[in-house]
Image (cartoon, grey):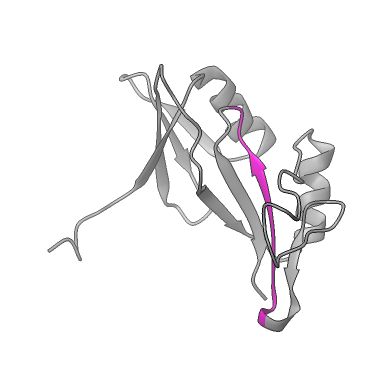
Amino acid sequence: MFARTPAFSSFSVDDLDAARKFYSETLGLGVSDSEMGTLTLTLGSGATIFVYPKPDHEPASFTVLNFDVDDIDAAVDELNTRGVTTKIYGDDNLPGMPNDAKGITRDDEHSMAIAWFRDPAGNVIAVMQTS
C-alpha cells in the first residue's frame, strides 16, 4: 500500500530554539524552519526528520535517531568535546550489555558498538559502529 509513498520520521521537543541549536551546531545537521513553526532535519543520507514543538512533551523512552559511524571512539570523543554526555545508562539499565567510561557498549561477536546520548528535550539518540 505505501511501498512507493514518500515517508519520514518525526519526534517532538519542548524547546524549538534549543533543538535548532543542538541539531545544527552540535551535531552539524542541516536544519530548516518551516512556516508552521517546526523544524526539518536533513540527514547525511538526504532523509528528513520532522521535529515539532509539543508543550506537554515527554522524552521518548526509546532511541529516536541512530547515526552509523566508521569510528565510534572518535565520534564519542567529538560529542564529549562538544559537551554531549554519552554515558547516560549504567550497567544496571542494560543487563548483559556493560558499557565503558565513555558509555560505549561493545559487542565484538557481532562487530557492533553503540553509545547513547540525549538531545536538549531528553530524546534518546545513538551513535553506532556496525562494522
Residue located 68% across and 62% down the image: 95
Which residue corresponds to the image point at 65% horizontal and 54% vertical from the top-left? 127
Percent position of residue 29, x then y: 57, 40
Q: Which secondary structure class fits the magenta region best?
A: strand
Task: Determine which quarter of the picture holds residue 124.
Answer: top right
Residue drawn at x 68%, y 34% is: 26
Nearer the observer, 28 or 129: 129
Residue 77 x/y as whole percent: 83, 49
Specify the quadrant that holds the C terminus: bottom right
Position of residue 55 in the picture relative to residue 109 (left or right): left
Quadrant that contains the N terminus: bottom left
Q: Position of residue 94 (x, y in %)?
A: 67, 58
**Near-viewer residue (130 or 55):** 55
Seen in the picture, residue 19 relative to 92 is either above or below; the reply is above
Residue 10: x and y in percent read: 38, 40
Residue furthest right in the image: 101
Q: Residue at x 20, y 66 (%)?
A: 3
Range of the magenta residues? Answer: 110-120
Whether 119 is among the magenta residues is yes
